[in-house]
Image: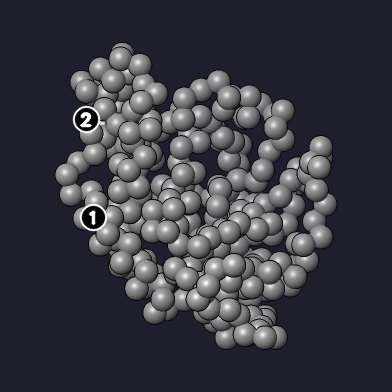
Amino acid sequence: EAAGLPRPQANSTLSGCRIALWRSHDVSPPGREVSEAMTKVAKALEAAGSIVEELDPPMDPVETYRIYLRFVSPITGSHMSEQQKLNIKNGSAKDSYPSNMKSPLWEMDMAGVLGVPEGNQEAYENAAKCWEDHLKRNYDAVLSPVFPCDAWLMASEPDAKIANSSTSARPIIVDGEERCYGDALFWSHLSVLCGFPSTSFPVCLSEHGLPVGLQAFSCKGSDFVLLDIVSQLMNLLGSNDLAHPPGFD
């Protein structure tokens, strides 16, 4: 048992909870069904008396994303062939990235080949403190997409493509368009980088009968309070009782 972490009050409710909604970002715009799930959650929270507002980031999330990508870059660099590394060094691989991801992913691969830039640790510490202070001061929880589209069956074509391609080139299908799998890393990067408690939860089923989920995260030490908020929200939505996806045991 984790000692010292705040516990939710007995018979706590969603009334008065300060909830921030992080609906979208240009790096990884969510698909229609994910956006609709966010709207559904917002209406449910407002009806329950929560204080719901749009997230006001204390700093540009792209900057924290860059910091995160630099930290994971040694992993990607270790899997590159010598030719891939050469392409990165001379810049010939840059045009292979989708336009909306070109800058962040390019920087990750550059760091994977050339090394993590000096000062990244200090940048991380400053960013983590900035976000921690902001969350603690303003919100009980932040809700955001956890992935830009609904789940897919393991035997589906997107999954088969993912299994046979590199991380930065993996495709996903969002509203009928093929997009880079790597851009979905954006939505989980902040809680991972800053060490925030986070969880994902189903909101509803997609048109394909597969779960559409969102992510909830908050400041350090709020683990039990965050889980209580999400549990109450799922009860409110009725998403505790969603049917399992086909073939799911």
Q: Residue furthest top?
A: 83
Q: Amino acid at mark 1?
A: Ala
Q: Residue furthest left?
A: 118
Horizontal side of 75 relative to 152 (left or right) equals left
**Which residue is rendered at x = 47% and y = 71% of the image?**
221
Q: Which quadrant of the structure image shows residue 163? A: top right
Horizontal side of 64 relative to 117 (left or right) equals right
The residue where tag 1 is placed is: 123
Q: Which quadrant of the structure image shows residue 208? A: top right
The answer to whether residue 186 is above or below residue 144 is above
**Which residue is rendered at x = 56% and y = 27% of the image?**
162
Mark 2 falls on what kind of element?
helix
Percent x, y of residue 173: 59, 36
Mark 1 falls on what kind of element?
helix
Horizontal side of 119 relative to 125 (left or right) equals left
Nearer-N-terminus badge (2/1): 2
**In 3D space, how far apart are the residues under numbered discs 2 and 1 (Cα atoms)?**
18 Å
**Which residue is rendered at x = 48% and y = 56% of the image?**
24
The answer to whether residue 12 is above or below residue 195 is below
Q: How many marks?
A: 2
Please name whichever residue, 68 or 35, is drawn nearer the observer in this view of the structure: 68
The residue where tag 2 is placed is: 114
Q: Which quadrant of the structure image shows residue 118? A: top left
- Other residues around mark 2 within 10 Å, as few (<14) / some (14–19) / many (≥20): some
For the C terminus, the quadrant is: top right
The answer to whether residue 209 is above or below residue 109 is below
Percent x, y of residue 95: 32, 26
